[in-house]
């Protein structure tokens, strides 16, 4: 309660400002496949508890019959076996173009500006003309085309009770898990999140180079092993050798995944003073210091790679519900975004409970919409009153 005064002043400032600072670096190494934590994960007890608290508030939300059908449809969705690999056509290779845009605004604008096309894809799914896997592939193709991506990764279903998706850079595979998803927007938002990881990796490779990145990653891997097990190497020469071998292995994997060809198709950032170059360096450091969600959920979610991807996931899901699926009003959309951006701002980092709520929202951005709808029915019609109620 004592924090309300602080929150009031903070909210006033944040909600009227469009600038968000997103940098926080952390420590440790990254696994091969990045795993996007979903609502079924048990990684953080406090986040899960917070999640159930939010669910309680949401219990009385009236879900329209249309949304119920979608939920049921996605629930009934058959899971294909992992051996039945999906081959999706790669979009035609295009010439590199300057100013390739992978900003948050760009993702949101793609949805806003192409809502009829997206509505068409969604209604094909609703009519049963596309199954979940075809729907996922159609959406990925749509996104890649609108972003003018010369290449995008292959999509595959993953069966897991812990993650909603993943991006494996060494094979260029984007994974999604249908079992934890209830809405079409859950799937589209997950694809946006993972596709952004592909683009982050592209940005690191085309700016820093595959070779340099592989060496740095190999060094960071071997150092992490040595920290755990000081007897892993007998001499300095052995350390150097191990790093070299590991780097060679990475270079080979990235090349066979086609990365050298992929980055040729994208604009290169060679000027160290350009904002693109600076961002690529930050992304590189974030990857070298990556922490997975099971190890430390708040470090994981505040890693720049994840922070960007979760922000894109939440904003696009809310936009899809508004522009494409028409399940929320403009006012509800604006409030949902305001609440998310407030919680996601650095000023809220130290507000008790704010991180847990943000984690719960990142796990399932549709929770924000349910909260806003529930709050409306309770007579709360602005982000400030709603945040007061949930924090
Ligand atoms: Zn991620």
Image (cartoon, rainbow, N blue to C red):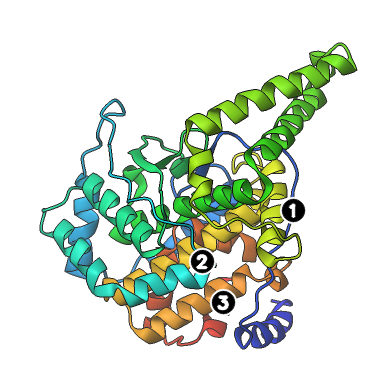
Residue 106: tell me if it is visible. Answer: yes
Disc 1 on helix, strand or loop?
loop
Q: Residue furthest front?
A: 95
Q: Which mark is residue 387?
A: 3
Q: What is the residue that sits farthest to the right in this orientation?
A: 236
Q: Quadrant of residue 289?
A: top right
Q: Is residue 327 visible?
A: no
Residue underneath mark 1: 25
> Circles 2 and 3: CB distance less than 8 Å?
no
| Residue 89 shown left or right of residue 228 in the figure | left
| Mark number, residue 353 | none
- Which residue does the numbered mark 2 point to in the structure image? 101
Q: Where does the image place residue 262, in percent across and percent down from the top left?
A: 48, 45
Label 3: which secondary element: helix
Q: Is residue 14 left or right of residue 324?
A: right
Q: Where does the C terminus fall, quadrant-wise?
A: bottom right
**Residue 171 percent location from the top left of the image:** 47, 33
Q: Quadrant of residue 247?
A: top right
């Amino acid at each position: 309660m004592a924090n309300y005064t602080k929150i009031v002043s903070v909210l006033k400032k944040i909600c009227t400002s469009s600038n968000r600072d997103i940098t926080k670096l952390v420590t440790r190494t990254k696994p091969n496949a990045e795993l996007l934590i979903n609502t079924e994960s048990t990684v953080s007890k406090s986040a899960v508890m917070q999640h159930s608290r939010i669910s309680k508030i949401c219990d009385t939300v009236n879900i329209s019959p249309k949304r119920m059908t979608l939920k049921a449809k996605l629930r009934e969705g058959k899971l294909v076996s992992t051996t039945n690999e999906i081959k999706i056509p790669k979009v035609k290779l295009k010439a590199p173009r300057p100013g390739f845009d992978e900003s948050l605004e760009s993702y949101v604008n793609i949805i806003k500006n192409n809502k009829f096309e997206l509505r068409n894809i969604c209604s094909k799914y609703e009519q049963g003309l596309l199954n979940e896997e075809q729907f996922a592939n159609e959406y990925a193709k749509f996104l890649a085309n609108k972003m003018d991506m010369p290449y995008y990764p292959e999509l595959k279903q993953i069966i897991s009770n812990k993650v909603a998706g993943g991006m494996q850079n060494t094979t260029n595979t984007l994974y999604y898990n249908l079992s934890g998803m209830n809405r079409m927007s859950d799937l589209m938002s997950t694809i946006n999140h993972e596709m952004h990881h592909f683009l982050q990796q592209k940005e690191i490779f085309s700016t820093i180079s595959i070779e340099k990145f592989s060496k740095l990653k190999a060094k960071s891997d071997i150092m992490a092993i040595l920290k755990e097990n000081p007897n892993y190497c007998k001499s300095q020469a052995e350390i150097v050798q191990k790093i070299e071998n590991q780097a060679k292995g990475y270079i080979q994997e990235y090349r066979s995944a086609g990365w050298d060809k992929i980055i040729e198709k994208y604009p290169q950032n060679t000027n160290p003073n350009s904002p693109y170059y600076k961002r690529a360096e930050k992304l590189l450091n974030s990857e070298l210091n990556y922490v997975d969600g099971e190890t430390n959920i708040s470090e994981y979610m505040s890693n720049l790679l994840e922070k960007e991807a979760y922000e894109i996931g939440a904003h696009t899901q809310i936009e899809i519900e508004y522009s494409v699926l028409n399940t929320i009003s403009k006012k509800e959309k604006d409030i949902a975004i305001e609440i998310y951006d407030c919680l996601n701002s650095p000023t809220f980092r130290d507000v008790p409970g704010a991180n847990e709520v943000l984690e719960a929202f990142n796990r399932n951005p549709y929770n924000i919409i349910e909260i806003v709808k529930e709050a409306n029915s309770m007579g709360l019609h602005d982000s400030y009153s709603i945040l007061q109620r949930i924090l």
